[in-house]
Image (cartoon, rainbow, N blue to C red):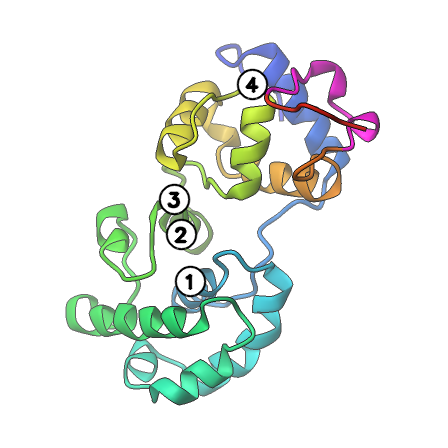
Amino acid sequence: MAIPEMMDRAVGGILQTLSATYPEARYYLTFSSPLELLVAAILSAQVRDEVVNAITPALFKKYRSARDFAEADPAELEGMVRTVTFYKNKAANIRKACRLLVERHGGAVPEEMDALLELPGVARKTANVIQQHAFGRVEGVVVDTHVIRLAQRLGWTAQKDPAKIERDLMALLDKGWWDQVPHLLKQHGRAVCRAPVPACSRCVVAKRCPKAGVSQHT
């Protein structure tokens, strides 16, 4: 992707390098409908994608509609998702969210940000994920732990609050990059720019990175 004139060339250079380094970077949760994405995204908070992908096939085979999830036996649903962290809270949020889908949206997942944010277990990060990957609507930047860490180290933001970080990134980056940047930062964060100590000697963008907040690196 070309660097737009309005975007800082240093930032654009980093993104082009990361894009070339991680051409496979993409969203990794497995789903086949907006409802499945909603459920998987709720389960994925503070959990690796592969852990969620391991349990969702059986889950989606048993519960095929929002009403199915809303009327699920709590203990049975908890048992199917118990390998994820905070599984009881997440199972409860899935049931509550699906109940609202049935009551307010005819069982369908809404596209609008305000409506998504009304669903239990859905904060702005998850709402952005659903908009982008279920409906192709890019209205913001998904801010997860990798995005927070790397955006700060790269000097793209000095904020700690995810909402403020998202605003900084939306102002800094051309909109054409908004949906891809989280995937690139996640890949680089897992491979090289890890917490708490990044492997800067192996970093493809080390010469462009101010290493903001990094006290030691290898």
Q: Which mark is residue 53?
A: none
**Quadrant position of the N terminus in the picture:** top right
x then y, percent, for residue 206: 75, 20
Q: Earlier in the sequence, mark 4 or mark 1?
A: 1
Q: Which residue is mark 2?
A: 126
Q: Are marks 4 and 2 in contact (CB under 8 Å)?
A: no
Q: CA distance from mark 4 to mark 1?
A: 30 Å
Q: CA distance from mark 2 to mark 3?
A: 13 Å
SS state under label 2: helix
* In this rendering, the label closer to the viewer, 4 or 2: 4
Q: Are marks 4 and 3 in contact (CB under 8 Å)?
A: no
Q: Are marks 1 and 2 in contact (CB under 8 Å)?
A: yes
Q: CA distance from mark 4 to mark 2?
A: 25 Å
Instruction: Please identify the quarter of the rendering in which residue 65 is found.
Output: bottom left
Q: Which residue is mark 4?
A: 155
Q: Which residue is mark 1?
A: 42
Callout 1 amino acid: Ile
Number of numbered markers = 4
Say left or right for 9 vs 143.
right
Callout 4 amino acid: Gly
Instruction: Please identify the quarter of the rendering in which residue 122 is found.
Output: bottom left
Q: Residues within 10 Å of mark 4 (few under 14, many from 20)?
A: some
Callout 2 amino acid: Thr
